[in-house]
Image (spheres, rainbow, N blue to C red):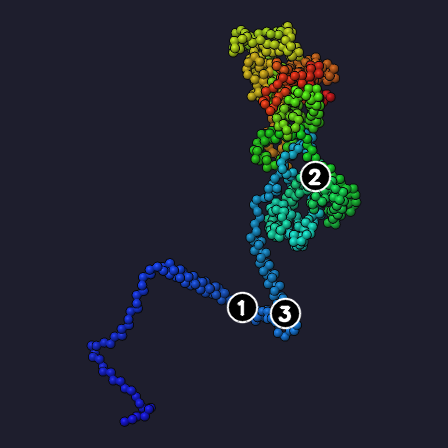
């Protein structure tokens, strides 16, 4: 029977399973993954990449979570942002206007640029640090040496710079510089936007290299940066200047600027500029001179008036402009300005360069003493900045130098052979130890050997006063270990030539088994003679015996107490009394000064005061010590006065207070003259020595003149101001 389609149904009969039977669906297990055989590293890399993506997704989710609170604001700004979005060509516009941004876009672009620029500047300011190390030229200074009258003598160091505290720089000098360079210094933030813009234009283009920066910026460039004209250097300069202006006071910045700026003539700093151009300290500059120096800051090569006529004209115009500027900023009244009508012409050359060759020897002596007495290491001294005020007298030094120079020239004319090895050591020392003048040599650049300080020449008979003083002070011993017997100037000794030297036990024998005998100059015999007469006439034999009677050790101690150095005292043999010691001219003059100082000795010194950048440096100044008694010193002086009168009666008649004697050696290797007036002692020694071979003295061969025309005496007279 056929059924209609709608009722056609397929029926499937499924017999029910028994209650204890269960129908199970079995799902086959997935196949096992094979063990990796060679792709483990690749698998690990793929795994790592998956981990990185996961980490990135996690980071993105966290970032979105942080930005979620800003979503409402972003929805509000979205319409405006869409308006700023450029649509080109712009609908509703024709021609070239279709391609021009709208005013909204212009404003948005400008504001965005300013925002980015501000963020950049803030970041740059925060990341810029003030350098901890200054430029080498910012800290390097020279040491300046002064004559006893306070005028500059010489300088040492590669750079002429002397730092001065701002309090020692006059207000007029400061404002002359500020008027020239940065009149708004005390009110500006350390930079000038207009100046920086002009500086950038000059850096990119070919403009004038000077001007444009504030004093703070110039100071930063001087002490922290280099002089390169680059945009990066200019930008760094501005950032450091801003920070420095917040960290330092204006006065501190101005002080640093004035002490580090270049003024030409090898001079850094206003103090050295004042000395280089006007030969005076900055404290003594007037407004007119200060304005001229301030003009040099624009470029000393263009404004040093001594270099050319064009420079002079530029310097004149800038000098006038600076003075007028000072009137404008109310630092000079019109009436004061009217008094400055004549340009302050500077010195033609830097006086610190014209010190002369002889000053090098003075600087050497003063440097050695300054370091010792000031307890300064070589490293400290070489850092510079010291002002060394010496004891050297300019006039005495010049007189001594002229006299020796004349003697050298005369010796080369008369005896060119011996003259080539001639040396002239000389020194003048006061009774209180100050070294007034020395002659060290012809030129320190070619002969570093200091003839005044050389301890290689025997003293000869110039040593006799020390033997005389030892005998008078300590007496003599006629028996070994017995009491001392007093000796006076009137004590009589044998003045004959070739007499044996005796001890309490008998004749003195040398190591070769020969008796030691004493000899006079020229083998002259004088018979019985008092000690005062023997010294006045320079008779050797009494003093050789007096030394033995007094004790050679006592003679040595007396000579050292009077000023001779222990390492220059000769061997303790009878010849000690006749001058086998080798004192320098400085020490010989110091020893004679002890007698002029009534028996008190003050160690010779060449520096009386030291400062560093104006601050005093502690100095161990020598103090007088008793060497011999006052009466003994007077007895020695009296005998030396007799000696001077006998040898130079005409001069003695005019200068009765002069005392001195000549000194000769047994083998004619040195000729001395040593003596003093009431307060100054001078010692001169002439000798020959071939420095290229040895320090052994050579025979003089007539180089020292004769007894009637003694070269040492002529030099001594010039040093003592006798003409």
First reached walking from the N terminus: tag 3 or tag 1: 1
Name the mark nearer the viewer: 3 or 1.
3
Quarter of the rendering containing residue 403: top right
Q: Quadrant of the N terminus?
A: bottom left
Quarter of the rendering containing residue 598: top right
Q: Which mark is residue 74?
A: 1
Q: Is residue 213 found left or right of 550 in the rendered image?
A: right
Residue 472 vertical placement versus 291 (above, below):
above
Judged from the image, the secondary structure of the residue bearing numbered disc 3 is helix
Q: Does residue 582 show up?
A: yes
Judged from the image, the secondary structure of the residue bearing numbered disc 1 is helix
Mark 3 and mark 1 in contact? Answer it, CB < 8 Å.
no
First reached walking from the N terminus: tag 3 or tag 2: 3
**Residue 704 drawn at (x, y percent):** 67, 18
Residue 232 vertical placement versus 73 (above, below):
above
Q: Quadrant of the C terminus?
A: top right
Name the mark nearer the viewer: 3 or 2.
3
Give me the residue at 52% from left, 66% from top. Answer: 70
Q: List the residue tagged with mark 3.
A: 99
Label 3 – label 2 distance at C-alpha: 65 Å
Judged from the image, the secondary structure of the residue bearing numbered disc 2 is helix
Label 1 CA crowd tier, 10 Å (few <14, some 14–19, many 20+):
few
Give me the residue at 64% from left, 20% from top. Answer: 687
Residue 591 vertical placement versus 283 (above, below):
above
Q: List the residue tagged with mark 2.
A: 274
First reached walking from the N terminus: tag 2 or tag 1: 1
Give me the residue at 63% from left, 68% from top. Answer: 101
């Amino acid at each position: 029977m056929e059924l209609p389609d709608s009722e056609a149904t397929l029926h499937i009969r499924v017999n029910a399973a028994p209650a204890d039977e269960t129908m199970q669906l079995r799902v086959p297990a997935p196949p096992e993954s094979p063990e990796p055989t060679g792709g483990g590293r690749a698998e690990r890399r793929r795994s790592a990449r998956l981990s990185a993506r996961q980490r990135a997704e996690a980071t993105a989710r966290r970032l979105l979570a942080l930005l979620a609170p800003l979503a409402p604001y972003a929805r509000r700004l979205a319409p405006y942002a869409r308006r700023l979005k450029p649509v080109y060509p712009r609908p509703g516009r024709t021609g070239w206007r279709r391609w021009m941004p709208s005013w909204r876009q212009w404003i948005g672009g400008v504001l965005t640029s300013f925002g980015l620029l501000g963020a950049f500047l803030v970041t740059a300011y925060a990341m810029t640090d003030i350098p901890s190390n200054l430029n080498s030229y910012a800290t390097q200074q020279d040491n300046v040496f002064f004559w006893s009258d306070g005028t500059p003598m010489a300088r040492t160091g590669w750079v002429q710079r002397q730092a001065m505290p701002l309090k020692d720089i006059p207000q007029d000098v400061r404002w002359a510089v500020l008027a020239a360079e940065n009149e708004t210094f005390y009110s500006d933030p350390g930079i000038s936007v207009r100046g920086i813009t002009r500086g950038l234009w000059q850096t990119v283009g070919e403009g004038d290299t000077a001007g444009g920066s504030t004093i703070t910026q110039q100071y930063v460039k001087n002490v922290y940066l280099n002089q390169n004209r680059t945009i990066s250097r200019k930008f760094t300069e501005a950032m450091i200047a801003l920070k420095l202006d917040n960290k330092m006071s204006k006065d501190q910045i101005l002080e640093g600027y004035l002490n580090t700026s270049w003024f030409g003539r090898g001079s850094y700093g206003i103090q050295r500029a004042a000395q280089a151009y006007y030969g005076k300290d900055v404290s003594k500059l007037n407004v007119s001179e200060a304005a001229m120096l301030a003009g040099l800051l624009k470029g000393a090569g263009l404004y040093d008036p001594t270099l050319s006529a064009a420079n002079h004209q530029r310097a004149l115009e800038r000098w006038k402009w600076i003075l007028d500027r000072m009137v404008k900023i109310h630092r000079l009244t019109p009436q004061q300005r009217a008094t400055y009508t004549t340009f302050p012409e500077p010195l033609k050359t830097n006086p610190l360069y014209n010190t002369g060759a002889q000053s090098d020897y003075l600087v050497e002596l003063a440097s050695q003493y300054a370091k010792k007495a000031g307890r300064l290491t070589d490293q400290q001294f070489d850092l510079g900045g010291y002002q060394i005020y010496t004891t050297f007298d300019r006039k005495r030094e010049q007189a001594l130098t002229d006299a020796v120079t004349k003697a050298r020239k005369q010796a080369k004319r008369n005896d060119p052979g011996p003259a080539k090895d001639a040396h002239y050591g000389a020194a003048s020392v006061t009774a209180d130890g100050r070294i007034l003048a020395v002659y060290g040599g012809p030129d320190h650049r070619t002969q570093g050997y200091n003839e005044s300080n050389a301890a290689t020449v025997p003293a000869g008979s110039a040593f006799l006063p020390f033997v005389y003083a030892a005998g008078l002070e300590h007496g003599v011993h006629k028996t070994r270990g017995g009491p001392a017997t007093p000796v006076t100037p009137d004590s009589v000794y044998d003045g004959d030539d070739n007499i044996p030297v005796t001890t309490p036990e008998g004749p003195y024998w040398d190591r070769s088994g020969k008796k030691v005998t004493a000899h006079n100059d020229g083998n002259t015999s004088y018979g019985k003679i008092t000690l005062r007469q023997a010294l006045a006439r320079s008779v050797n034999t009494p003093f050789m015996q007096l030394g033995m009677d007094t004790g050679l050790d006592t003679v040595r101690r007396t000579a050292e107490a009077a000023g001779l150095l222990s390492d220059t005292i000769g061997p303790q043999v009878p010849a000690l009394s006749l001058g086998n010691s080798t004192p320098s001219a400085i020490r010989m003059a110091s020893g004679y000064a002890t007698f002029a100082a009534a028996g008190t000795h003050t160690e010779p010194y060449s520096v009386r005061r030291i400062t560093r950048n104006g601050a005093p440096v502690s100095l161990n100044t020598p103090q007088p010590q008793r060497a011999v008694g006052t009466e003994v010193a007077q007895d020695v002086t009296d005998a030396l006065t007799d000696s001077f009168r006998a040898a130079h009666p005409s001069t003695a008649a005019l200068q009765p207070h002069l005392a001195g004697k000549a000194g000769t050696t047994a083998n004619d290797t040195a000729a001395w003259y040593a003596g003093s007036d009431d307060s100054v002692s001078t010692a001169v020694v002439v000798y020959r020595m071939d420095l290229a071979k040895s320090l052994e003295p050579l025979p003089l061969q007539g180089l020292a003149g004769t007894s009637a025309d003694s070269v040492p005496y002529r030099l001594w007279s010039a040093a003592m101001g006798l003409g």
